[in-house]
Image (cartoon, rainbow, N blue to C red):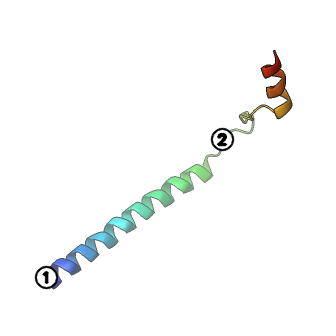
């Protein structure tokens, strides 16, 4: 029973380490290659514009 517990804990540690390394690698790649500065942000319309649309 102890062998199973130790095996499970070892596999959980190795799996968690693998996931953390993968996420870290993806984050580093994302920081190294940012979006171009000209990419427009999607901004929701203002309340006044929504009210004007609803009035018509």
Q: Position of residue 39 (x, y in %)?
A: 71, 34
**Crowd band around label 2 with a 10 angstrom C-alpha radius: few (<14), some (14–19), many (20+):** few
Residue sitting at x 13%, y 82%: 1
Indicate the quadrant where residue 22 lies. bottom left
Q: Is residue 42 above or below residue 15?
A: above
Q: Earlier in the sequence, mark 1 or mark 2?
A: 1
**Crowd band around label 1 with a 10 angstrom C-alpha radius: few (<14), some (14–19), many (20+):** few
Query: Of all residues shown, which one is farthest toward the top?
Result: 56
Query: Of all residues shown, which one is farthest toward the bottom?
Result: 2
**Element type at marker 2?**
loop
Q: Is residue 16 above or below residue 7?
A: above
**Which mark is on residue 20?**
none
Horizontally, is 18 left or right of 48 in the view?
A: left
- Closer-to-camera residue (53/44): 53
Q: Position of residue 25 (x, y in %)?
A: 49, 57
Q: Compute the Cα span from label 1 to label 2.
A: 52 Å
The C terminus: image quadrant: top right
**Element type at marker 1?**
loop
List the residue tagged with mark 1: 1
Residue sitting at x 84%, y 22%: 52
- Closer-to-camera residue (27/52): 52
**Which mark is on residue 35?**
2
Q: Is residue 6 above or below residue 31?
A: below
């Amino acid at each position: 029973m102890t062998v199973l517990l130790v095996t499970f804990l070892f596999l959980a540690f190795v799996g968690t380490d693998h996931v953390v390394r993968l996420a870290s690698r993806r984050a580093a790649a994302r920081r190294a290659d940012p979006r171009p500065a000209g990419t427009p942000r999607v901004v929701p319309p203002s309340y006044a514009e929504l009210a004007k649309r609803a009035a018509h």
